[in-house]
Image: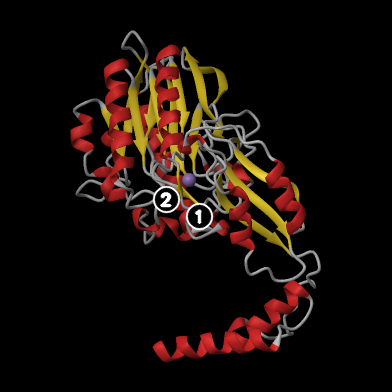
Amino acid sequence: MNLFHTADWHLGQLLHGHSRAFEHQQFLTWLLDTLEAEQADALLICGDLFDSANPPAYAWQMLYRFLADCRRRLPNLDLVLVGGNHDSPAKLDAPHSLLASFGITVIGQLPRGEDGAPDWPRLVLPLTDHSGAVAAWCLAMPFLRSADLNLSDPALDTEEDKLIGAVARLYQAGTEAMIAQRQPDQALVATGHAYLAGTELSELSERRILGGNQHALPLGRFPESLDYLALGHLHKAQRVDKAGKVRYSGSPIPLSLAEEHYPHQVRKLRIEAGEVVANDALRVPRAVPILRLPKTPADLASVLTTLEAQEWPEVAPERQPLLEVRVALSAPEPRLRERILAVLEDKPVRLARIQVTHPDAAPGETLPGQGLDQLNPTQVFVQGYQAQFGEAPAEGLLHAFDTLVAELEEQA
Ligand SMILES: [Mn+2]
């Protein structure tokens, strides 16, 4: 069977105020064509379908249209969607019985039965090949919040970390539930949306989860009998173990400017006679370029010259590159944004972010023994200014700052 693994779509995302709807639609169109061309038998989407718990209506429409198109064009495709830390578990779950009637599995949140035990029949699914035979079993595990884990269970008292212990036990029990049903020559697959120890985080776009990095899940706590663990959460595609049986597919589009250089991909696995015999990356075509100019931060005058000299191909607004401008400032430049926007006016490019660096900045100066809670706003302002520009703020600026603070305090 041909099994596809993707995650972290983040439908509905805005990147510094710019809609990603066009890029997402291009990806979904490509994915649907690819699934059809590659004769996919199963698709696992491992969390963070949406960027927020309350996504805009168009993002829901995109997802549902994709699912409907999948059903129409690939009637036998097994579709498994699990929630991530960005998704609202309840909202993702709301249509689950409707979607189940179309053969689509959605698990927003770990389902439990009336006795409090995990609802294994919902969580453990057969995946079928083109002939309709079961080729693999899938444990459809969503992102696990501490509320989903029975942390008061005395069995966890022996664990060094209760969160890690509870997650490990769930995977163990789920894998046992799969093994109980497995026939010879059927593979064992699981999904997850989690942060595994020893993996590479991206700048700015992944929220810390499950109590933070101290709860990073060790690879060794996942059942060894799994043939593949399809993960979501990290946006950079990466394998976690040496053999490549545990992988993050990564996001299909860059979700921050810093992810521009990632090899955005979906994974395609070939499973034969209960074994993963091939596991390949299929690169997602980039619909919109991200440009970071200049390559290294320069002073404003030369940045403006660089931008002026740049040739921008004429394209429709939604295809225009997203631009990060990198400026090195040695003095305050209050009209920075206006001056950059003036050069870019009428050009087919979208300004996403201005990254300012201060080459003359003194290395982080905070007074010894003083935390933020021991300083008043003016002291913080003066220190921040000094750290950035190497001198005290001018009298007039300081006065303006004090006036602002006074106004705010009055309002409060
Ligand atoms: Mn994510």
Numbered mark located on residue 85 in the image: 2
Quadrant position of residue 153: bottom left
Does 193 sit above or below residue 239?
below
Circle 1 Cα neighbour tier, 10 Å, few/some/many (<14 / 14–19 / ≥20): some
| Location of residue 247 (image quadrant) | top right
Could you tell me if residue 273 is visible in this image?
Answer: yes
Q: Are marks 2 and 1 in contact (CB under 8 Å)?
A: yes
Tell me the CA gap for discs 2 and 1. Answer: 8 Å
Q: How is the image coloured?
A: secondary structure
Q: Secondary structure at mark 1?
A: loop
Q: Residue at x 73, y 85 (%)?
A: 367
- Residue at the limit of the structure toward the top, as seen here: 131
Could you say which is closer to the camera, residue 107 or residue 320? 320
Residue 100: percent from left, percent from top: 22, 31
Residue 150, placed above or below residue 141: below
Question: The disc labelled 2 sits on which kind of residue?
Answer: Asn
Q: Does the beta carbon of the residue at mark 2 sit less than 8 Å from ligand 1? A: yes
Q: Residue at x 31, y 12 (%)?
A: 132
Q: Is mark 1 within 8 Å of ligand 1?
A: yes
Q: Position of residue 126 (x, y in %)?
A: 33, 23
Query: 351 or 274: which is nearer to us?
Result: 351
Q: Secondary structure at mark 2?
A: loop
Residue 207: mark: 1
Say few, some or many: other residues with alpha carbon within 10 Å of mark 2 (under 14 / 14 to 19 / 20 or more): many
Q: Position of residue 80 (x, y in %)?
A: 35, 31
Report if residue 123 is visible in the image.
Answer: no
